[in-house]
Amino acid sequence: QLQLVQSGGGGGLVQPGGSLRLSCAASGFTVENYAMTWFRKAPGKEREGVLCISSREGSIYYLDAVKGRFTISRDNAKNTVYLQMNSLKPEDTAVYYCAADSVAYCSSYAGGYDYWGQGTPVTVSS
């Protein structure tokens, strides 16, 4: 079965300045051969691309607001992609989704992605 399963987030509630790591494990396909992107959707806002990783391009940031705070990584042995989020801010509150694109080039266009994780809610609040 081809799917992405998300985990991590520690229940999803974190104080400002805190850190979280989200995981996205693939089954049925190899993440190394796909463009893997983390998207997020905040309440009342459109879904937006956050970070992407692909073997052809490395890491690509789509949001200036997360540069220096968020990183994306991939463990090929575990067939898993991670989103490390540090120095979290209230404006990072959103549901975070991982997605895989077989075209293997990064894109912030959500419609081009083949598989999606189930979403992980993250709330940054004191």
Image (spheres, grey):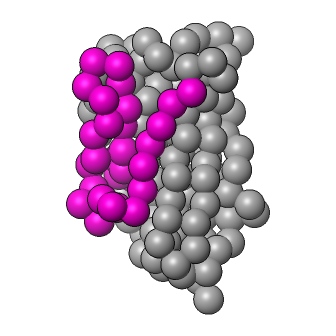
Q: Quadrant of residue 79?
A: top right
| Left or right of 126, for residue 72 | left
Is residue 67 in the magenta section? Answer: yes
Q: Residue 86's x, y, as percent?
A: 49, 65
Q: In which quarter of the image is residue 30?
A: top right
Who's the residue at 71% across and 12% down the image? Answer: 1
| Left or right of 124, for residue 48 | left
Q: Residue 113's x, y, as percent?
A: 41, 26
**Quarter holding the C terminus?**
bottom right
Who's the residue at 33% across and 61% down the image? Answer: 68
Q: Residue 52's x, y, as percent?
A: 36, 37
**Is residue 69 placed above or below 16 in the rendered structure?**
above
**Is residue 20 placed above or below 117 in the rendered structure?**
below
Q: Residue 38's x, y, as percent?
A: 45, 43
- Foreground of the two, 94 or 87: 87
- Foreground of the two, 106 or 94: 106
Magenta segment? 47-75
**Is residue 99 placed above or below 42 in the rendered structure?**
above
Q: Which residue of the protein is positioned furthest toward the bottom in this rendering? A: 126
Say how many tags the image has.
0
Who's the residue at 61% across and 48% down the image? Answer: 22
Q: Is residue 99 visible?
A: no
Q: Can residue 45 be seen in this view?
A: yes
Who's the residue at 43% across and 30% down the image? Answer: 36
